[in-house]
Image (spheres, grey):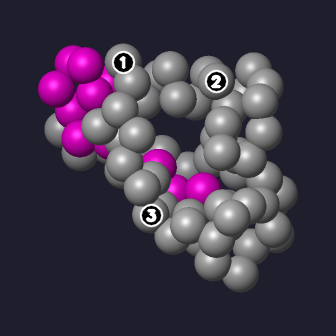
Amino acid sequence: MRICMLARSIPAHAKGGLEDHTMMICQGLVQKGHEVTVITTQHPQGKEYEVIDGIEIYYTKGTIPGKYS
């Protein structure tokens, strides 16, 4: 199954429970064989895309990192 998660912040933005929980859910889904994509706010250092532990992460340009805008 292809799954898309929307999250305002992940560990690239801040360290905390929400960020860790989001990534743990995604990692578990990848381990079960699903394709997981996360769409989140702009990366603090300007990255637009990366893959972490098999999770595709897209950072939305023009947003405030870690904030809904």
Q: Which dot marks residue 49?
A: 3
Could you tell me which residue is drawn at 81 percent across and 68 percent down? 64
Query: Farthest bottom residue?
Result: 62
Query: Farthest front residue?
Result: 45
Q: Amino acid at mark 3?
A: Tyr
Sequence-wise first label, 3 or 2: 2
Would you say residue 39 sits in the magenta stretch? yes
Residue 36 in picture, x, y percent from top left? 32, 42
Q: Amino acid at mark 2?
A: Asp
**Marks 2 and 1, how far apart at CA:** 12 Å
- Vertical position of residue 69 compared to residue 20: above or below: below
Q: Which of the two marks, 3 or 2, is nearer to us in this view?
A: 3
Could you tell me which residue is drawn at 73 percent across and 47 percent down? 13
Q: Secondary structure at mark 1?
A: helix
Q: Secondary structure at mark 2?
A: helix
Per the rendered image, the range of residues in magenta is 29-40
Residue 2 in picture, x, y percent from top left? 23, 45
Within 10 Å of disc 1 (Cα), the crowding (few <14, some 14-19, many 20+) is: few
Residue 9 in picture, x, y percent from top left? 70, 46
Within 10 Å of disc 2 (Cα), the crowding (few <14, some 14-19, many 20+) is: some
Q: Which dot marks residue 20?
A: 2
Q: Amino acid at mark 1?
A: Gly
* Location of the N terminus (image quadrant): top left
Which residue was labeled with disc 1?
28
Could you tell me which residue is drawn at 77 percent across and 30 percent down? 15
